[in-house]
Image (tube, rainbow, N blue to C red):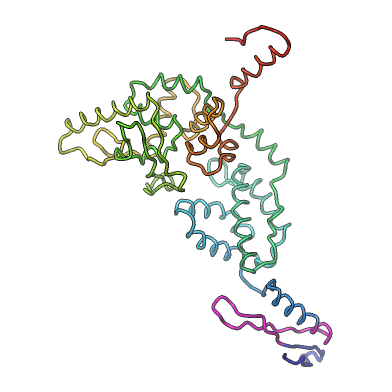
Amino acid sequence: MAEIKKITLKSGKTRYRTVVDAGYDEGGKRVQVTITRDTKTEVKAERDRIQHQRAAGTLILPSKITVGEWLDQWLEYKRRDVEETTIRTYRLALVHVHDRIGHIRLQELTEDRVQDCIDDIVANGRRKGGPAGTRLAVSTAEGVLTRLREALKRAVVRKLIPESPAQFVRVSLADKKADRKARPKVKPWTVAEVRTFIAGIERDRLHAALLLSLMGLRPAEVVGMRWSDVDLKLATLETANTRTMIGNVQVLEKDAKTEAGERVLPLPGPVLDALKKFRALQAREKLAAGEGYTDSGYVVVDQLGMPRNTRHLREHAYRLMGELGMRRVRLYDARHSCLSYLAVNGVPDVVLAAWAGHTNASFTKRKYVTIDVEDMRAAATAWDSFHGGDRKAPV
């Protein structure tokens, strides 16, 4: 054990100093901590604390790493677990944190600083889609907070900080209420609206592709599907390939995001018929185009066989909605309508999750199942019976 030495500063003040072993860093290099205090007793107390925490495995060594530097390291670590598109999403979200508290040393970050950061992101975080510096959607701010919590939790594991200062940070109730007023949630289509859309697109060239969206597939799964993934005889399809968009410009082709996403689904009769007709149409288009046709193998292609992407499919669907005079909703929200319909009609939770490509049935119901007033009509009818009435539900 190193002795405690008495030292005299240039000012003439007397202090006490010793050096204590603090273990080894990630590269295997020995780490020593110099302790300097006004009294020998204070030096002993600090030395004992370091030695005790080292023995217990709880010692946090001093570090100059900033919040921004740690977030960059965390993103590199996450590349082992998530797709490049997800890394890009994380990086864009954490830009807000970089701008506000990225310069602060990680070990000096407090809960109050994190809370102030999140409050400011909600109040002034908008970068696009409206005037810069105005309110950001609460859902976006909560996504930023989720990523920050995950990064700081990892810093705890790596013994850079003793606990996460973001653990109990929340978006305020007042901000949530203001957000609900400013951004009313767009409801997915009702069953009646879905049926109206289906009836209106029967003669559209991409009828089959749109029906695939309406049966609960993600847009990236629809445009990534190949004819080799479809068995028209067994009436099944496999969602093994996706074509996502980076920045709404670049197409990234990859396999399903998760193991649950790689699933085989039975084809409903109308979807099967539409796919057979689309297959036959593509055969005629190929014959007409001759050498100008590209046999890409994808299901969703243009008249020359070139694959379509999610932006093409989305814009095509929006145009049809406008022509039909319908309320415009995202194609992705068609999953909500589909899964809500299946849930209300008694499909078991485990089947519902498998159909959606999720591993967790409770997540599927919480995020994708929306009950509207017509779904509850049967409950009103049941109340009629409870009260002894024989009235019928309005038609």
Could you tell me which residue is drawn at 29 percent across and 37 percent down? 227
Residue 261, located in which quarter of the rendered image?
top left
Residue 78 horizontal side relative to residue 174, left or right: left
Residue 242 horizontal side relative to residue 293, left or right: right
* Residue 108: % across, % down: 70, 66
Could you tell me which residue is drawn at 79 percent across and 93 percent down? 6
In the rendered image, the residue lying farthest to the left is: 291
* Magenta region includes residue 61: no
Residue 369 horizontal side relative to residue 120, left or right: left
Question: Over which residues does the magenta segment extend?
Answer: 19-44
Quadrant in the picture for the C terminus? top right
Quadrant in the picture for the N terminus? bottom right
* Residue 174: % across, % down: 73, 40
Could you tell me which residue is drawn at 72 percent across and 58 percent down? 111
Q: Nearer the viewer, residue 21 or 34?
A: 21
Q: Nearer the viewer, residue 95 or 246?
A: 246
* Residue 117: % across, % down: 67, 54
Q: Is residue 161 above or below residue 221?
A: below
Q: Nearer the viewer, residue 175 or 194?
A: 194
* Residue 315: % across, % down: 40, 33
* Magenta region includes residue 32: yes
Q: Is residue 343 above or below residue 39?
A: above
